[in-house]
Image (tube, grey):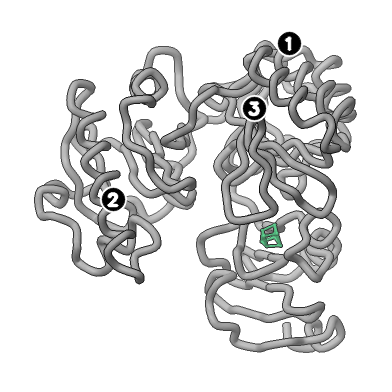
Amino acid sequence: MIDIKKNGWCPFYNKAFLAKDGYLLRITPNKSSLSYDKAVNLCELSLSMGNGLLDITNRGNIQIRGIKKPNIEKLSKELLKKEITIENDKVKIIISPFWVKNDDNIKFSNIFISQNSYIPISPDKFSIAIDLGASPVLRDVLSDIRLEKTDKGEKILYVDGSKLGRIINEENIVSYITELIKLYNHCISKYKHIKKMSCIVKYDLLPKKWMQIPILKSSRRKFPNLKKFGSSYTSKYGRIDAALFLDFLKTSKPTNIRFTPFKSFIFENNNNVEHSSFTSVDNNYELKVYSCPGSNSCSSSSINTHELADRLSYLRYNKIHISGCKKGCALSKPADLTLVGNNGLIDVIFNGKASDKPNISSLTDKQLLENL
Ligand code: SF4
């Protein structure tokens, strides 16, 4: 039986969400990766039971859009049967897309997947970022707790927002995560102002034992040599046309496809095949323009975000975020310029997030261009 809601929860393969363009399901591929056959299956399912549009989320998951109500149950079963998604996401895992076979990212991801049922229930969006490469790459990705390496190569677990954490190992990680989830559940039920795990740090509620060892200092995200993993491509605003993607898959035949939290994907072993609908990425994934799906897909948006993003991408800001509403689904971190839909008009925020107080409010399209 599928759960269906209009808003207020995190969709999954068995929890549908009603958006403006129909129902959507969200899948979490194991290790953010699909084999060639599974990726082909995903495209075919999107084309036969959805509207043929897929979105890569900023946690590297995939949304299947435009599903008609009678198809939801069947699609959900197919996604699980064909192993396109993991089955249990009580704790949502965001894994560094730069894992290599049997490395620490994989080891810890396997521990969480196998032990998921022993971990206490947490609020829907609670997540852990497994970021165990030499240098962290997921700090800009929204997560409650983070697993990284220290400068000495030890594994450190810390709460988002803290600069200090606790050394962990494969034996104690599940009990430590359990402890943190219990703390989180206790704080959100007791204090109204605690909404996210980082609030526990902000309001000084984190016990000292969780603040023992400094995390790695890292002012800028350093991506590893992307070529080591295959050929990387971005898809504008993370949106993928399943028919074009299927065509790309069939012409380039990658062995595996990894989906990243950077609105991009990696084709393993495809020797740099090009496709006019997807942009090759050479050495880094830093994006200039972020945009949520906007009014064509989401009822919370009163503006056409993609159209606005296309028109404004020439502006000389390093990072631009166009958001249909204050929720800021496309980017949880600050951008140099953030534009937010407000009853068909646009709010402007400089150096902030979509949820911040606007610097300029309720501009028309014409006024917006005069102010930028
Ligand atoms: S940020 Fe965009 S996609 Fe997210 S709820 Fe608002 S309008 Fe919808």
Q: Tell me the distance, in whole angstroms, between the alpha carbons under discs 3 and 1.
A: 15 Å
Residue at 44% across, 13% down: 101
Three-letter amino acid code of the residue under disc 1 = Asp
Instruction: Judge whether 63 appears above or below 189 on screen.
Output: above
Residue 123's spot in the image, x, y percent? 43, 48
Three-letter amino acid code of the residue under disc 3 = Ile
Residue 53's spot in the image, x, y percent? 83, 38
Left or right, residue 36 beside residue 67: left
Near mark 2 (Cα within 10 A), the count class, few <14, some 14-19 or many ≥20, is many
Q: Do the residues labelled 1 and 2 touch (CB within 8 Å)?
A: no
Which is nearer the N-term, disc 3 or disc 1? 1
What residue is disc 2 on? Answer: 159
Q: Residue 37 — which label?
A: 1
Quarter-of-image position of residue 175: top left
Which is nearer the N-term, disc 1 or disc 2? 1
Residue at 55% across, 42% down: 59
Q: Tell me the distance, in whole angstroms, between the alpha carbons under discs 1 and 2.
A: 37 Å
Residue 69's spot in the image, x, y percent? 82, 37
Which is nearer the N-term, disc 3 or disc 2? 2
Residue at 53% across, 59% down: 332
As helix, strand or loop, the secondary structure at mark 1 comes to helix
As helix, strand or loop, the secondary structure at mark 3 comes to strand
Pick the front one: 262 or 35: 35
Q: For the residues carrying marks 3 and 2, which lies nearer the camera in this image?
A: 2
